[in-house]
Amino acid sequence: MEKKEFKAKVFGELAGLAKALAHPFRLQIIDLLAQSSRTVEEIAAQLNLSMANASQHLQILKGVNLVHVRKEGHYAHYYLADAKVVAVWQSLRELGMERLAEIERTLNDFRSQKHSFQAVTIDELLLKMEQDNVVILDVRPEKEFRAGHIPGALSIPIDQLLNRIAGLPLGREVVVYCRGPFCVYADEAVELLQNQGVPACRLEEGFPDWKSRQLPFHAIPD
């Protein structure tokens, strides 16, 4: 193989991989699968896509080995190939937030409309956990909580939070987390809690970021 042919082939394959990532819905699918495995039906419902459209996006990601699939009965469950896929998504997200001013502007505009909530980093949360003066609240769907969560976190999905606020421990700050910086569940939860007089802030990052740092986490086997 000639040098030019070699380079054209290798860089062409890498360009194909980048092309597979270059779609808003496929990036959202990776963000979802970083939480837990999903069926086509679940992904279609979460992203408000048709089954055919969701399946097409999954096949593109599967074609470049970013996602795998396992069959369970009549359902196909899709999951990320490995932790490197999450790392690529996180690197792309962070690069975009650093280099593309429109992303930061959009994020700030959204949060200012929902009031200016305080956010804490993972490092700040770790300090609060050492002092044992914080309630950690996971507002993702229960399936995602069972797949993995921060040790000691309480699971109250966002659609159940209003009816379960009274059950939260009293006298401690609540730190809410969800899927990551672009997930709105935590913002909605903090707004709801503060409106009910509960001191709360959101974790800037999400559970996949916690896991990527090799920090301890718990999972509940099916």
Image (spheres, grey):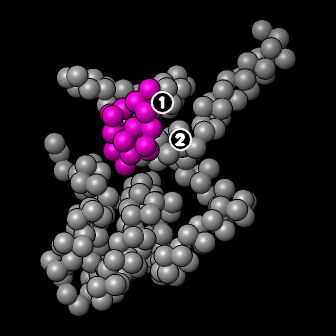
Residue tagged by mark 2?
Answer: 25
| C-alpha separation, residue under disc 2 versus residue under disc 1 | 10 Å
Answer whether labels 2 and 1 touch (C-beta < 8 Å). Answer: yes
Residue at (60, 72) in percent of width and height = 108
61 vs 8, left or right, is: left
x then y, percent, for residue 110: 55, 69
Q: In the image, what residue type sits under mark 2?
A: Phe
x then y, percent, for residue 34: 41, 46
Q: At numbered mark 1, what does the secondary structure look like: helix, strand or loop?
A: helix
The residues colored magenta run 34-54
x then y, percent, for residue 45: 36, 42
Residue tagged by mark 1?
Answer: 53
**Looking at the image, residue 42 lies above or below residue 114:** above
x then y, percent, for residue 35: 37, 49
Residue at (19, 50) in percent of width and height = 220
46 vs 220, left or right, is: right
